[in-house]
Amino acid sequence: MVRRQFCRRTATDGPVLLASTDKRGWRIVALLFLGILVNYIDRGNLSVAAVPIMRDLGVSPAAMGTLLSAFFWTYTALQLPAGYLVDRLNLKWTYGAAFLLWSLASGAMCFAHSFSQILALRLVLGIGEAVAVPASLAYIRNHFPPEQRGLPTGIYVSGMMFGPALGNFLGGFLLSQLSWRHLFLLTGLGGCFWLLPWLLVAPDREARDPSGSSQTMVTADWKRLLVLPTFWGITLGSFCYSYYWSFFLTWLPSYLVLQRRLSFLRMGAYTALPLVAMAVIAPISGRWADRLNSRSGSSLGTRKTFTCGGFLLGGLVLFIVVVNSPLVLLGILLFSTAGLGLASANYWTITQEFAPPGLIGRFIGYQNMVANLAGICAPALTGFIVDRTKDFNLSLFLAGGALPAAAVAYLALVREADVRAVRSLPFQASLRPD
C-alpha cells in the first residue's frame, strides 16, 4: 500500500512536501547518507594512496596537487547543471546513473599506469559525483518542514565525514597489506551494492515546479538574490570553509606520512578518528538546533550561532604546527573537527532556508560550486607550496586561517531579514503535483 504524501504551505517556506512521518522518507535519508559516504570514500582514495602513487609512478608533489585538484574541475563546473537536473528530472534514475558512473571511474583507477590516465579518470569521477549533494539536499528541503530539517540534514552530512573516515582507515589497512591498486578496485566497485536498495526504495516520481521554468523567471530570481548580503555571506563562507575541508581530505594524509613520519596504519587512524567525531556530532548538533528553534522561534539565529562557533573552534587546527607530540596532534584534530561537526549540519540548513522555492537544486548547486572552487585551489596550491618549501606549514596556516574567515562572513552578512525577503518575494513555486 502506498502512503499518500501531502503538501502544505508553511508561513516560512511556501509549499513543502512532508515526509517526516513517513518511514519511506527516512529510509531514503538513510540511503542518501550511505550514498554520500561511498561518494566521499571514492573521491578521497587518491589522497590516501598519494604517497605510494608518487613513488611508483614518479609523480612530483606539484603534479599530485594537480591530480588531487582535477576531480574538482568537472565536479565544480557541473554543479549548476546538476542543480538544474535535480529541479527538473527524476531523483531515482538521475542519482542512480551518476552513482554507477562514478563507481566505475573509481574502480578503473586500479588499471592506471600514468599521470594522464589518472587525470582522465579523476575528471570522469567528478562528472559522476556532481549530482549527489544537490539531489540529496533538495530531497530533504522538499520533504521535511523547516523545523525538522536539522536532523535529516545532520544525518546526511555525517556521511561526508564517515566516508573519508572509513576510507582513510580502510585505505591505510589495504596499503599496509596489499597495494594502492587493490584499494581502488575494492572500494570503487564495492560501492555498487548500494544501487539495489536505492532502485527498490527511491520514488519513481518526485514533486516538481508546476509552473514550468522559463529562463526569464529564473534570471529574475537570481537577480533578486544577488542584492542580498546573505547571498554573499554564504558565498564567501562556503569558499573559506571548503578550502580547509578540501585540504583536510586531500593533503592531510600525506602531511601525516611525509612530515610527521606516521605509518600508513597510524595515518589512517589519525585522519579517521577526527572524522568520526565530526560525523557523530553533526546530526546531534542539527537535532539540538531543531529543538532550540522550536523554543526560540529564531531558526536562522540559532543555526548561525552553531555555524560560526563551530568554524571558530575548527580554527584550533592552526596549533598543530607548533606541537611535537603525536597524541597532542591527534587531540587538536579531534577538537577542530568536533567544531566543524557543530557547524556542518546547520551550515547546510541555512542554505535550505535561504534557497528560493523554484531554485532549490540550483541554489544548492551554486553553493556547492563555490565551495568546490576552493576544492580546485586548495590541493593545487598546497602541492605547489610543498614542492617549493619542502614542508606543509605555510599550507596549514592558509587552510586553518580560512575557518575564522568563514565565521566572519556568516556572522557579518547572513541575516534573518534577507531570509524573510526571499520568502516574501514572488519566486517560482517549487512543487508539481504528481
Image (cartoon, rainbow, N blue to C red):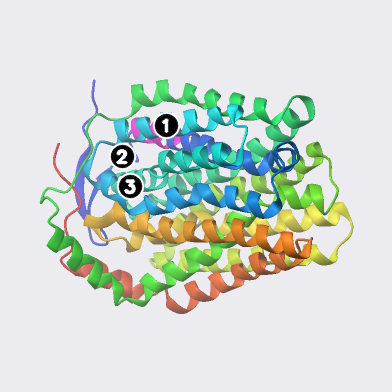
Cα separation, mark 2 vs mark 3, equals: 24 Å
Q: Residues within 10 Å of mark 1 (few under 14, many from 20)?
A: some
The percent position of residue 394, horizontal first and vertical second, equals 73, 68
Q: Which residue occupies 53% across, 32% down? A: 106
Q: Which residue is mark 3?
A: 82
> Which residue lies most toward the right here?
325
Q: Secondary structure at mark 1?
A: helix
Q: Please name the amino acid that badge 2 sits on.
A: Ala
Which dot, 2 or 3, sits closer to the camera? 3
The magenta-colored residue range is 23-31
Circles 2, 3 touching at the beta carbon (< 8 Å): no
Residue picked out by circle 2 = 19
Which quadrant of the rendered structure holds the C terminus? top left
Name the side, left or right, on which 294 lies relative to 175. left
* Residue in front for this viewpoint, 286 or 328: 328
The residue that mark 1 highlights is 101
Residue 359 placement (x, y as % from top left): 25, 56
* Residue 316 visible to the viewer: no
Q: Is residue 243 above or below residue 58?
A: below
Total label count? Answer: 3
When the figure is inspected, residue 305 is found, relative to residue 54, above or below; the finding is below
What is the secondary structure assignment of the residue under circle 2?
loop
Q: Is residue 179 magenta?
A: no
Q: With respect to residue 218, does 201 lie above or below?
A: above
Q: Nearer the viewer, residue 394 or 278?
A: 394
Q: Going from the N terminus, do you reach mark 1 or mark 2 first?
A: 2
Residue located at (41% from left, 67% from top): 300
Q: Position of residue 342 (x, y in %)?
A: 57, 58
**Mark 1 or mark 3, whichever is nearer to me:** 1
In three-dimensional space, the C-alpha distance between marks 1 and 2, rounded to whole angstroms, equals 29 Å
The chief SS type of the magenta part is helix
